[in-house]
Image (tube, rainbow, N blue to C red):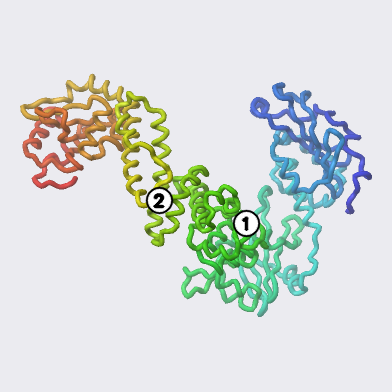
Amino acid sequence: MSIILFSDIKPSWKMLPFNEGKGMIPAPERKWRENSNSPIIFPMMIGDRLVFRKFQFPEGVTKRQDNAKELSRFVFYGANIIREDADGSWKFITVDALQAENEYYDCYKAMSYFAWEALLREFTDKAVIANKRYILMAMKLVRENERFMLSSFQEIYRIADRESRELQGIPDRIVKELCGRSMPGGIAVRIAKDLVVVTGESKLPLLNLTEQTRAYFDGSRAFFFRKSPLTKSWLVSGDTEYFRYDKDMRERYIDRDLFENTCMERFVPGAIEHKFKGNKKVNYGHLMAQAVFLSAEQAFKVSKRLYFGVIANIFAGRITDGKLALPELLGITGSQVKFMDDINIPFNLNEFANCMRDPEFNQYYPDVKKRMFATSIFLKGADSYFVTWSLTRQELFEAAKTFNSLEKIADHEKKDKLIGEYLDYIKMRRTYLQHVSQMQDSDPLFEEITKFGEAPISIKPSIIKDRHDKLGKIIDIIQCSDQINKYTEAIRRRKEKEAKDREYRAERYSVIMPRDALDIITEGRKLEHCVGRAGYIESMAGNGCTILFVRDNNHLEEPLITMEEKQGVICQCYGFRDSYNHDPEIGQFIKDYAALRNLKIQTTIYSPIEKAG
């Protein structure tokens, strides 16, 4: 069907004015009516064309159909898609332009079975639209409640439009093989000395359909095809389109010898899969990436690390331009690409290029090599689910002197360790500064926390470990401070209620309960064991366990031995740095205490040798 000029078309608003027929809009769901400000869109037939009408409700007005104002229409007529606006303006648009219209509520979801059956019948009988037969075939295969949703119809229309393509300019022997030979998916076969075919399958996103795919490689070039699930006819695909849809290729392994004498032979070295004995297999996804994407082919020649980074970006769909050269992709010059081998390749190379071109990054990191180094660290934390830290731009810029110094370190192991400690330091610094800003002078640990002083971002690499370790101890104290505020009252109530049953005083030693959370923290810090953290305070507050102190009667404020009692059992008993008690008199005292309270002992309460528990 030929293209029809708008001047030859009767505009839809001449048949049905804007804002007319609002009563036909299906009532949206209650949840949408109450909470959404998004416009609504719904399909209908106006004369002989399918029209998607877009309405908006005035803000603050009850969402009823008669309050709606029509904004625009998307008209499918002949081989055209036309956008008509309420002011009487119009323009021809492409099917892809509809993707911009993604903020709306599709009222087709609310249409009754009878309404959409009537719409389908009217569309079948009246619609003047190119490739109508293909559209109707596709609509029968779409999930029932999505036939005329704008997103579904957009894909149906695109598929139908593609059906009109013909196999032009394809060598006769390939057309003969393509149309005359049936092949299962997922195989690779040599048809002739210089002709190989690889078959596959791909899923269509919105439709419940599977397409067959084939790639033919002869001595000079590659040919890509997809078989329509509607008409069972073969369609020509672009190389990047084939790569994007045929996802199973990424994990397929094919005999490397199969590609001898074909256009793919020169890419085989970069796709060899070493996990197979004798390196006799190639990864088909890597092979295709090099053949389809110039950036992948060039990256293989630079370094293995960069190559796999580019491949990962291609697989993730971040790189879609097959003709984009590697320097342009990375935002650097060709002579600077060699520096990429010395950095951790980020997960998002598009963002890497943006940072490399960013004026602020240039200001703080004028040296290209150092800018690459800093940018890779910045993006690794921002993009990865597996990295527990991330830098803000401001932190990255404040850290410029430190990162510039770290980049100079030749020992990669030492450099990576310092980078890890430095990033951890910055992460702890945030917690520290936030806590200090909220502290009161009356906080029991105020002096211990604030004595650390300032925590500058820019520090020399030589002091990174020292600053990291010291700040780590402060963070432990901060966590203790939070536990004091949260659990002190509960621990005090336990002591008031239970002390008479749990505390015990003999001639030389006593067992006492902690007065509050600070008591437990002090015990753990002075004896340098874990009772002051790791959940013991929370457990004590919630009756999950009972922390008890063994003290010398002459020095009741000095920690000696710490015990944990749980469900009638003494399960832990440790002194300084988790050492066992090696004083037999204390051992006998604990044994007597347990007998007095009918407690079981399931831990070492005395050892003649001083050894860590």
User: Do labels 1 and 2 touch, CB within 8 Å?
Assistant: no
Side (left or right) of 561 relative to 300: left
Is 340 positioned to the left or the right of 139 in the image?
A: left
Marker disc for residue 65: none
Q: On the picture, is 496 further left or further right than 26?
A: left
Mark 2 highlights which residue?
420
Residue at 53% across, 65% down: 338
Q: Nearer the viewer, residue 143 or 326?
A: 326
User: Residue 416: image x %, image y %?
Assistant: 40, 56
150 vs 123, nearest the viewer: 150
N-terminal of the pair, mark 1 or mark 2, is 1
Real-space Cα distance between discs 1 and 2? 29 Å
| Residue 9 in sight here | yes
Inspect the image, locate mark 1, and give the three-letter code of the amino acid beneath it. Answer: Ile
Quarter of the picture containing the C terminus is top left
x, y percent for residue 2: 89, 53
Q: In this orientation, which residue lies closer to the viewer: 554 or 396?
A: 396
For the point 78% across and 57% down, the residue is 163
Other residues around mark 1 within 10 Å, as few (<14) / some (14–19) / many (≥20): many
In the displayed image of the protein, which residue is found farthest to the right? 8
Mark 1 highlights which residue? Answer: 319
Q: Position of residue 167 (x, y in %)?
A: 79, 65
